[in-house]
């Protein structure tokens, strides 16, 4: 059974990974894909780190807190980049990333 302090962070990370994957896919469909390159890069990095953080927390890994610290940093960077773009998928991703960053910061503390 998962510790309740892990549960909300695992959920936030899992959700963020999916939202970031969706955002990256939608960015690739934009007319000016080149303008979206940084957003796509960060979406992909964020999705991967969020998935790994969720996995490590679910295992009770001794590295989970460290991974959550890194995850929070990448989520914040991704959220800041996404917030620069007016597309609904980017705005949704920005909100989700910031929420995940907050959860991960609590875990890493």
Image (cartoon, grey):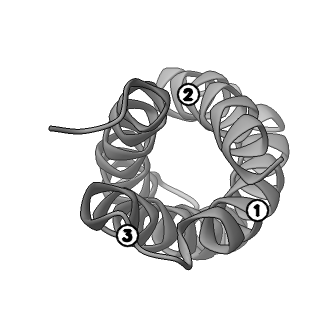
Tell me how far mark 2 sits from mark 1, CA to CA: 17 Å
The answer to which of 8 and 99 lies nearer the viewer is 8
Task: Give residue 1's quadrant in the image.
Answer: top left
Say which label, 1 or 3, has the lower sequence index. 3
Q: Which residue is mark 3?
A: 56
Residue 73, how many percent across, how many down? 82, 60
Residue 29, how many percent across, how many down? 34, 55
Position of residue 95 relative to residue 47, above or below, is above
Task: Give residue 55's quadrant in the image.
Answer: bottom left
Residue 88, how many percent across, how many down? 51, 20
Say which label, 2 or 3, has the lower sequence index. 3
Helix, strand or loop at disc 1? helix
Left or right for 21, reference 71: left
Task: Give residue 78's quadrant in the image.
Answer: bottom right
Left or right for 80, reference 8: right
Helix, strand or loop at disc 2? helix
Position of residue 107 relative to residue 25, above or below, is above
Tell me how far mark 2 sits from mark 3, CA to CA: 20 Å
Query: Quick one: label 1, few (<14), some, or many (20+) residues within 10 Å?
Result: many
> What residue is shown at x 43% (from left), y 41% (from top)?
16
Q: Which residue is mark 1?
A: 69
> What residue is shown at x 62% (from left), y 72% (from top)?
67
Left or right for 87, reference 76: left
Left or right for 23, reference 2: right
The answer to which of 14 and 60 lies nearer the viewer is 60
Which label was assigned to residue 96?
Answer: 2
């Amino acid at each position: 059974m998962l510790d309740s302090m892990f549960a909300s962070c695992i959920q936030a990370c899992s959700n963020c990974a999916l939202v970031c994957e969706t955002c990256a896919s939608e960015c690739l469909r934009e007319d000016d894909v080149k303008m979206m390159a940084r957003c796509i890069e960060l979406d992909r990095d964020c999705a991967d780190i969020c998935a790994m953080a969720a996995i490590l927390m679910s295992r009770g890994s001794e590295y989970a807190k460290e991974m959550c610290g890194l995850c929070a940093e990448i989520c914040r960077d991704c959220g800041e980049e996404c917030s620069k773009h007016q597309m609904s998928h980017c705005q949704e991703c920005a909100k989700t990333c910031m929420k995940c960053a907050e959860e991960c910061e609590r875990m890493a503390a």
